[in-house]
């Protein structure tokens, strides 16, 4: 049994790799930080192949696929991604495009390439509760990328279902999780953050049960449920206030 995990050097990706190894899976782990991947490799008991790639460079996505496409990979975990907190007028365009390349294009490429691989049994696309919201002022590009991930995954699920394909595809939509994401995005959460280990194990267990939308934590479920009853403009105002309180510079 073999699994591919992108963004495996820290946070949810690292915890997913650890859990899959405990379940007996050999691993292919990918991230920008080779030292952290080697540390993970030495920590795990199953076989681990390490690939140091910056997957925001789309050429690297294809290079990686060429190196591993001959392997019988059962599980694809598209976890690589990041967010940025800025007013839209202050956002650096290059940073936004880089985020789109990683959060959207990389995930799209691997999903597309592996969904047609006869060995693929499960695909887990990591989004966010942000992906189930109509918009995220002060984190507009991040929210938009996660909306893409959710919409893309849901559509593929229905096509696979109608084709009677034996592939499970799921999208993970956690709320706040205590990971390095917070430092890179330059935010702090006012709500209690979930533990990355809990989120990873919850996600994999639900993936094996072929749950489509995986939402760890009761507070996220409640929040998303009640958001359905609010007018979009009102919801955007509330989201802005919530986002504003995350600013570490306040």
Image (spheres, rainbow, N blue to C red):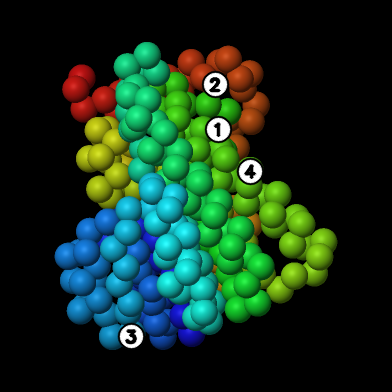
Where, by quadrant of the figure, is residue 206 drawn?
A: bottom right
* Residue designated by label 2: 235
Residue 69 in sight: yes
First in sequence, mark 2 or 4: give its number: 4
First in sequence, mark 2 or 3: give its number: 3
Q: Residue at x 53, y 59 (%)?
A: 110
How far apart marks 4 and 3 lie (CA) works out to: 34 Å
Which numbered disc covers residue 46? 3
Q: Residue at x 43, y 72 (%)?
A: 67
Q: Nearer the viewer, mark 1 or mark 3?
A: 3
Q: Nearer the viewer, mark 2 or mark 4?
A: 4
Percent x, y of residue 88: 39, 18
Residue 210 in sight: no
Which numbered disc covers residue 133? 1
How far apart marks 2 and 3 lie (CA) works out to: 46 Å
Left or right, 208 with reference to 96: right
Q: Residue at x 57, y 40 (%)?
A: 148
């Amino acid at each position: 049994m073999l699994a591919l995990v992108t963004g495996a050097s820290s946070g949810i990706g690292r915890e997913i790799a650890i859990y899959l190894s405990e379940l007996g899976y050999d691993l292919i782990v990918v991230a920008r930080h080779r030292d952290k991947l080697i540390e993970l490799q030495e920590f795990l008991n199953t076989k681990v192949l390490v690939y140091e790639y910056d997957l925001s460079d789309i050429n690297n996505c294809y290079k990686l696929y060429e190196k591993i496409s001959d392997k019988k990979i059962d599980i694809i975990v598209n976890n690589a991604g990041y967010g940025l907190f800025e007013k839209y007028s202050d956002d650096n365009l290059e940073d936004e495009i880089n985020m789109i390349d990683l959060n959207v294009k990389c995930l799209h490429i691997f999903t597309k390439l592996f969904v047609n691989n006869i060995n693929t049994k499960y695909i887990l696309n990591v989004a966010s509760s942000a992906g189930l919201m109509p918009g995220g002022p002060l984190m507009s590009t991040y929210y938009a990328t996660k909306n893409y991930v959710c919409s893309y995954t849901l559509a593929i699920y229905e096509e696979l279902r109608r084709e009677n394909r034996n592939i499970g595809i799921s999208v993970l939509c956690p709320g706040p999780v205590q990971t390095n994401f917070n430092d890179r995005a330059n935010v702090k959460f006012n709500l209690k953050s979930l533990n990355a280990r809990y989120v990873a194990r919850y996600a994999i267990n639900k993936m094996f049960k072929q749950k489509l939308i995986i939402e760890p934590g009761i507070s996220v479920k409640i929040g998303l449920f009640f958001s359905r009853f609010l007018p979009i403009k009102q919801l955007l105002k509330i989201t802005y206030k919530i986002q504003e309180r995350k600013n570490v510079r306040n």
